[in-house]
Image: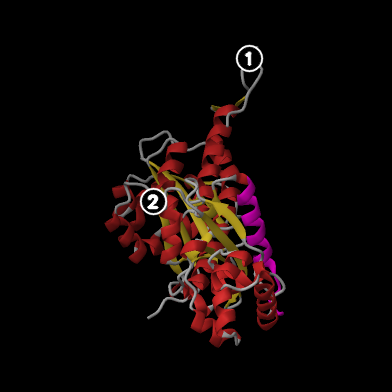
Amino acid sequence: MTATFNREQPPPVLGSFVVADRLERLYGLVDLVYGAALDESEWAGAAARIADAFGTHSAGLQIVGGDDGSTDILSTTANLTVQAVEAYRAHYVSTDVWIRRASSLKPGTGVLGQELISDADLIRSEFWQDWARHQRQFHVLGGLMPVSEDQTLVLAVHADRFWRGFDEDDRQLFGAFLPHLQRALKIRRKGLLEGERAAGLSDAIDRFRTAVWVVGRHGRILAMNGAAQDVLELPASPLVMRNSVLATRRGETTNRLLAAISAAWAEDRSDRMRQPHPPIRLEFLDASGCLHVVVAPSRQDGGRHALVFASQPRLQRTDAAMLKALFGLSTAEADIVARLVAGDSIREIAQSRRASVQTVRSQVKTVLSKTNTRTQAQLVGLIMGSLANLRSA
């Protein structure tokens, strides 16, 4: 996105940069960090793009603090080698004169290195002599922002000793960018906490024949089983993953799916008998069949998630014996339920069993009562998420 101006007049100049250029660089950085908040792999290249936006070669993004006082170096540029980063983490973080002197400053503002320590004192410091000068770091523009009660983000952009140095224009761009970076890292932190909780479900969902995703409120995938991965890899699959978010290939059905996820995430599960939301039917692109998608709420260790189940009805295999044991169904009722989950209609089930439609409907009504469900859709959703769909050992 680029700002536009009246072509008959020159764009307004702020310092040494035109406003349009600054806005374009700011928008690029904002887009970068919000994308990385949803896709952890994008942080690796974040420092290089931040440095490039300021016309330099060096930048580092780290989070300090936490229960153990550790330093989480989130992203660095190429000049900071693995060996340099490890040396910094092991020792030089404690001698970093920039961080030590910046810790007492107001969060959220860009600070020039010369405001923290004079050039002469920096050159005499152990930190610069033994570490920073080898990374070609002399000028610095940095800032601090809290991301939790006990963690602080530190962003620093560096330049070589013989570079022009940072100025007020750089500081203003830096200050405009910091709040967005703070917000992105809070989103990331929340996602990581959700992921840690969801990881406890991974072994359980791997046991399901049905494809299962554990997702956050806005559809961000926290965990999935092998069947779910297989569904996403099918060329004609109506379900896709975009920026770590579970979606469909059509905007309308994506909105329905995300609305169901958000509603399930927000549900009060004090009533343990509440049922999953009605299934969403999604057609394969090659007209080879469909997916039935059911969303249900989940709680674990105080965290909130939604569970998304997807099955290909004609391929669904439900353990009838397990259905009998779980819900007290008769052999005939368990067979009917398994066929419903597989996508058969009441009429098709009646024909295959050589029974009347009315008889099958009566049996389904009995099953609804035994499973405390009100509709066939709720029944199918319940069974898809039950032990009856576990793989055999």
What residue is rendered at 69% in x and 76% in y? 362
- x then y, percent, for residue 143: 53, 51
Q: Nearer the viewer, residue 187 or 144?
A: 187
Quarter holding residue 262: bottom right
> Can the viewer see residue 87 in this picture?
yes
Magenta segment, principal secondary structure? helix
Q: Nearer the viewer, residue 175 or 362?
A: 362
Q: Which residue is mark 2?
A: 76
| Label 1 neighbour load within 10 Å: few <14, some 14-19, many 20+ | few
CA gap, disc 1 to disc 2?
Answer: 40 Å
201 versus 109 height, above or below: below
How is the rendered protein coloured? Answer: secondary structure
What residue is rendered at 36% in x and 40% in y? 160
Q: Amino acid at mark 2?
A: Thr
- Locate residue 335 relative to residue 232 in the image: left or right: right
Residue 125's disc is none
Q: Amino acid at mark 1?
A: Arg
Residue 198 sits inside the magenta stretch: no
Mark 1 or mark 2: whose residue is earlier in sequence:
1
Q: Nearer the viewer, residue 59 or 342?
A: 342
169 versus 157 height, above or below: above
- Locate residue 208 relative to residue 82 in the image: left or right: right
- Locate residue 22 relative to residue 135 in the image: left or right: right
- x then y, percent, for residue 367: 65, 79
Quarter holding residue 16: top right
What residue is rendered at 31% in x and 53% in y? 129
The magenta segment is 252-271
Q: Which residue is mark 1?
A: 7
Marks 1 & 2, CB-CB < 8 Å contact: no
